[in-house]
Image (cartoon, rainbow, N blue to C red):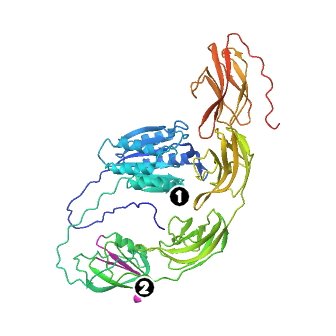
Amino acid sequence: MPSFFRPLLLAFAVPTALPVLAQTTPITPRTMIVMDGSGSMWGQIDGVPKLEIARNVVADVLAGMEPSATLGLIAYGHRRRGDCSDIEVMVEPAPGSASAIAERVNTMRFQGRTPLTEAVRRAAEVLRSSEDPATVVLVTDGIETCEADPCALGRELEASGVNFTAHVVGFGLSAEEGAQVACLAEETGGRYFQADDAAALTEALTQTLAAPEPAPEPRPEPLPVEPAVQPGPWYQGPGFMNGLQLQPTGRSRATGAPMPAEISFPAEGTAEMCQTACASDSLCTAWQYEPPGSLFVAEARCHLYGADAEFDYSFDAGFAAGTKPDEPQLTRPFERPLPDASLSAPLSAPALSILTVEVGGPLNPLDYLDIIEEGGNRLNAVPSYAYLRDGVPVRIAVPATPGRYTLRYVEEVEGQPPRILASQPLEVTALTYALMAPDSAQGGGMLSVDWVGPAGERDYIDIIEAGAERTNAAASDAYVNEGNPLPLILPLAPGLYDIRYIVEGSEGRVVALTRPLTVTAPQATLSAPERVGPGTEVTVDFTGPANGRSWIDLSPVGNQDFTGELSYDYLAPGSSRMTLWAPAENGDYELRFVAEDMRGNRQILARRAITVVPGIVPPPAPAAPAAPGK
């Protein structure tokens, strides 16, 4: 499958008996972990909150770090809701700080927004105190929500000339979301990792936090060799191809390069083992695998060649061969024959189902099936794909969006352009969806939505401004597995909105159904005694958006902040009465109804004056009003 992000290059040291000319001791980069503390980390993977997975994985990975590793920790969104400036350096970069970081991660509260761009900028500023190499490892389960551009920051950091690399770990992100943050890594020479479970997160952190491998010992320059007559020109061959047979011409390319070392190859060895043997020897530039029984020899063989050899080629089933990209050694341009290939699958399938496909063809290690919109001819960013190396028949996810598609067998051979070997039409049929809810509702209140849909594990219903197409940062959302009917907290801001059923398909998040909703301005009333005694219990009857996040408090007169209250309590959904304790100090105070929606927006909807006077005994509270609908 075509790679969408910059690959990581790994250097392996090869033992040699040649003298060492020079050796460079690698510098372990100072590393800052930037940890997502936003409220979305409460989302679950296989029934386990993402924050719990992250805490356990970080602790396990840090426990295996070198004690001398210089590490630091920055967290965002873990102290305050709705605050884009909530970024904290929790552990300054220092050797031996791994255990302190693990302890601080366990103290994080996950509740705020996602200012990931500014958090990475802060990390770069902290690390810039030294000219040594520096690395930032960003772990995020969401995209930027604070109107900043991570791609622009990546370009800015790269242009600054500082020896700085950023790696990004997208924890549970869709492919579309991953593309929005991967640029931060790409622009600084780092890597993007897609982690959808604990194992993938462990692998990503292990790779990004591990110290670099020592540089391989350089080999001495070969002795000069008088060039022979060079017939040339030569052409590049594939890196790996089943069915390819190299045919040495017996002539020399006069490079003077020595031959690779002899190897011991198992009688039942594979083509992949032969390719690996060549990759492990820096003198090897071409390799050929001969299967058991070929050329009247019972066991498998692996031949390694150096840069001095040249080849013609042919094709024979069972053989496999490849060349390295920096050494063209073929005597004629390489042209692959179009192999026979076939697909057998149903011509239609329901959206979000799994399609089983019988496949015939070369089955190269990188070959894959994909599903693309009818008429599409691109070979990347397709709605769905599955590698053939995982076995046949192939199981491939059907896209969530109904319509006409094409199922394709794509051959991909290292060093060669991909080719479509076989295709067939596929009709993706629609599923049944329904959303049942009032046409209008008061802001900040609870909205009950009855729904019909496939009920996938990651399906959810959201409320977003009318006409919006994005599938993140909605005003309110909840996974469908939380109930039917599904309760949603309405936004405080009045206006036109859409209620949407969103499914997680192979192509990412898809809006399956939309229905309009009008949100009216929130209103509230407060009823309580005008005078109460010091330290007495005050009964408050109210109307307004009781949603579990809104509250009533008792504050000094004129308090405009959402802090500084003397007494408060949250309002459970469906409630209409609550109690507070009056302050011990005499004086004038006021009760306030403070509404808060799911995204942390707050508004004071009602106030009522109340005076604390000595000797006042509050009258018995009247019977609580009946709950709505009773």
- For marks 1 and 2, give the one nearer the viewer: 1
Q: Residue at x 50, y 55 (%)?
A: 178
Where residue 426 sits, quadrant-wise, is bottom right
Instruction: Left or right? Give the position of 140 relative to 414.
Output: right
Q: Is residue 35 visible?
A: yes
Q: 253 and 335: which one is in front?
A: 335
Q: Residue at x 32, y 77 (%)?
A: 328
Local SS, label 1: helix
User: Which stretch appears magenta?
Assistant: 282-306
Local SS, label 2: strand
Instruction: Left or right? Give the position of 391 relative to 187.
Output: right
Assign the C terminus to one quadrant of the image. Answer: top right
Q: Which residue is mark 2?
A: 315
Q: Which residue is mark 1?
A: 175
Q: Residue furthest bottom?
A: 296
First in sequence: mark 1 vs mark 2 = 1
Q: Is residue 203 visible?
A: no
Kindly identify the amino acid type of the residue bearing the numbered disc 1: Ala
Q: Is residue 398 above or below residue 499?
A: below
Dot 1: within a 10 Å radius of its alpha carbon, few (fewer than 14), some, or many (20 or more) residues? some
Instruction: Left or right? Give the position of 282 relative to 437.
Output: left
Where residue 614 sits, quadrant-wise, is top right
Q: Is residue 343 above or below residue 611?
A: below
Q: 630 and 375: which one is in front?
A: 375
- How far separated are the C-alphas under marks 1 and 2? 38 Å
Kindly identify the amino acid type of the residue bearing the numbered disc 2: Phe
Given contact means CB atoms under 8 Å apart, are the residues at marks 1 and 2 in contact?
Answer: no
User: Residue 303 placed where, x, y %?
Assistant: 34, 79
**In magenta segment, residue 232:** no
Q: How many numbered discs?
A: 2
User: Residue 605 placed where, x, y %?
Assistant: 66, 30
Residue 300 marker = none
